[in-house]
Each structure stands twice: as structure tokens, then as C-alpha cells.
Amino acid sequence: MKTSVFYGYIRCACLLYLLTILSACGGSGGSGDDNDYNEAYLQFYNGSPNGATVYVKELDGSDLSSAQFGDSSALISLEKGDIELEFYRYDADDKKVVIDTLSVNLKESHKTMVFLSGDFSAPVFTTEQFKRETMEDHFRLMAMSVMLDDTKEYDLYMSEAGDPFEAANMLGTIVAGQLTEYDYWNGDADSKDFNEDEYTIYLTEPGSTEVVFETPTIKFEYSTEYVLVTRDISGAIQNGMILDMVLNSSVVSAITDVDASSQYRIYNSVQSDSPVTVKLIGDNADEAISITLAAGEVSEFTEVEYGDYSIDASVPDNSIAALSNKLITLNQSESKAIVVHEENNALATVTFVESALSQAFDKTINFVNLVDAYSDVDFYLVRQDETIDTAQYTAKFVEYLETETIVVPGDYYEIIAIHEDTNDERYLLYRLPLYGFNEESNYIVTLEDAENNGGFKVTVID
């Protein structure tokens, strides 16, 4: 069951589009020479899959930027010369924890990239540097690996859009800890750089012609340096590989294999003595996946082929009207949560994408409002020394059947759900005692109608 190769990559396209409004994207395609870049440039990329958000600052100086896993900092312009960098994270008490320091010599007209890789308990910082160039209608292409298995190498092939792998050109090998620049196979007298155009990228095991990773068609439309980074997948999906495209901004495009699978899990919030049976139906109805869940039960993650599915849900005694033909799209390397609830005496679902960030230190929480009595709800995560007025982490104005996502440090939090009326008066809907968000899990927090008492309850799903 396959959707269009491009269909699952709207996010990638949108991210690349955003780069048009970022002045730091590099060469504009205009005339000039290398002196157009008359400063020193620094960028940090975080590729440690079991780490935290990492901040970078000048040692004994000011903060520069930060990056979550799979993201980069913005491009930072600095004066040339030696600089001492400090990398750190925050712990559950909001105290700074220094990870490492690094001495870097910044050169004029050069971009220095610092890559974080490896297990976060023994992180590896790799520094790569290259001279920036003014180009017109051309781009440069580089790549490296930050995968945990630092012996994993891939041969990099590239073809013009529409051409099969058999017509692709082998550019070289992607290796760990080493940024490699590749030559265009069809350079001309004007430039030996790549022509701005649409291409497809393929990866194979070294020396093999069996494709293990294929991208959708990628539009290389900026006259600048493109850096490709192979990295592990983290968060809700644990297996597989991502190809990150890093340019001169904090916007990183995460490109997935066109044949990568998807996954989902289902939570049954329906307050009924009868279990709910949920079916996911693809192209072949005979191969429908069926899961039956009691009230308050959550399924394990189920891996499926990517594509478009319809959802049917029912209870055995038909006391609640069945749900039929609700469409859900599961894109490559994407994990979705399906929350089954009751609306107007009928079964319904709320779906959302679960985080691809590491949950080792920072925890992603998806808040869902399943109470139709309130158009919006405020959730407060209150630590022992806080009140709702001083709580650092909140999810406010969560509308009925909508979700809101926040990232918090692993810690113990009291969850307080309130509604604030038009007179700014607060009403307590539910108060969940201190709960430890300490697992390497993507958390779901729901506000639901409580069974048989006319009140409400907060439920935490991990």
C-alpha cells in the first residue's frame, strides 16, 4: 500500500520553503566573489539520539544558541580568531550541567560546524570547517554520519529527478565523523558545482547496488552549501534512519526513506462497560488490523506500511453509534496516536503525531481536551515549590478535541486542569497528585468526563 512518494514529505517541503525568508541562507545567486562572506561563521548540530536540548555559549561569555536532537542552531556570525565554547544542558532543577568545552579557531569567510554525536553519556564533538563561496545557480553538497554505530557507512548516489537508480551517479561514501564534499558528475566550464535542480538521493551499503534508503524528489534551489547528515531515529519510533538536510539556519529538513514503515497506538477513553473494537483498513479490507480495548486501555505501538487508512470503531452491543470510514494518513517514519472518545452518543477519534525527539532527559507531553463542556482548558504542571501562578510549564487554551504539545524536563509534577471564564475567574476541573514523568516515553495527558459522577478526570498515558 503506497501513497505518492512526495505525499509524506509535505513537512520537508514546507521547511525548505521557510528558508526563502531567512537571510542567512547563503549565496543569493547574485554576482560577487568570495569576499561577500567577510565574517567567521559558526553552526552547531545536535545528533546525539539519547540526549537533551544542548546549549552553546562562549566560555565566560554570552549564550550563542541551542539545538534539540536532529536540529541545528542558526548560523552565527562572529569575529575570526580563537574561541572557547561551552556546551551544556539543564537538569530537572533548572540547573546548568556542563557537557563539554571546545576550543575552535574561527576563520574569516569560513563556516565552522560543530557536530554532536554518540551516546550522550560519552558525547563526541566533531569540528569541520570549509570556506564559503558565492555561487550563482549552483550549490555545493557535503555529507557525514552521526549514527551511534560509527562503523556504519553508506555509498551516496544521486540522480536527476525522474531517473531510476540505474541512472544515478555514485558520488562517494558517507562516513562517521568526517564531512566529505562531493563533485558534480556533469560540471561545466562555468562551475564544477552542482546545478540547482531537482534530484533523488540513494544510499547503499558500501560496494553494493542494493538501495537501502531512497529520498523523495528534493528541490535544491539555493546557491549555498547543503550538508546532509545521516542519523538514528529517536522518540516514538526507535528503528530506522533519517537524512537531515542542514543549511544556514535553524530549519533542518528531516528526510525519510520513501519505503519506511509507520506506526500507531490507540487509547480508549470511552466510559463504557463494553470494549471498543477499532479496525484500520487499507487497500485490502481482508487485511484489516483489528484491536479491542477496554475502557482506559492503551494498545502497544503497531508497525504498519505507510499510507492512507480508514478507521472503523464499534462496541458489541451497539449502545454507542459506530464510527465508519474516518481517514487517517500514516506517513513514512511517523508515529501517530489515535484517541477514541464518545461524542453525541457516537464513537469518534482524535489523532496526532507523536514526537520524534529523544525522551531520555526532556519529556514530550501531548495534552488532549475531551470535555465538550468547556471550549478551552488550561493545564498546569506544578512542581513541589510552585503554584499555578509560578508554574514554568503550562499548556493553555486547549480547545475541545484539540491537542497541545510541550516539552518539560523529567521530574515530578502535579497536573492541575482549570477553566477560566470571561471574568478571569478560575474553576478547578481536576487535580492529579505529583506524577513522575521519568520514563523514556511520549506522554499523553487527557482531560475526560469521569464515569458516573458528573465530574472530570486527568489521565496520563505513557
Image (cartoon, rainbow, N blue to C red):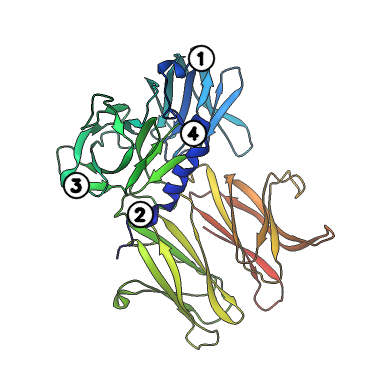
> Could you say which disc has been placed on residue 83 in the image?
1
Give neighbour class at mark 2: few <14, some 14-19, many 20+ (Cα, 10 Å): some
Residue 376 image position (x, y, % from top left) = 70, 62
Looking at the image, tell me whether mark 2 or mark 1 is earlier in sequence order: 2
Q: Amino acid at mark 2?
A: Phe
Residue 124 image position (x, y, % from top left) = 40, 28
Residue in the image at 52% along x and 38% along y: 21
Of all residues, the one furthest to the top in this rendering is 81
Q: Amino acid at mark 1?
A: Ile
Looking at the image, tell me whether mark 4 or mark 3 is earlier in sequence order: 3
Q: Nearer the viewer, mark 4 or mark 1?
A: 4
Instruction: Compare residues 204 and 193 and report the one nearer the observer.
Output: 193
Position of 367 relative to 209 (above/below): below
Q: How many marks?
A: 4
Say left or right for 246 vs 414: left
Between marks 2 and 3, how big is the CA–CA gap?
A: 17 Å
Which residue is denoted by mark 4 in the rendering? 249
Between marks 2 and 4, how big is the CA–CA gap?
A: 24 Å
Looking at the image, tell me whether mark 2 or mark 4 is earlier in sequence order: 2
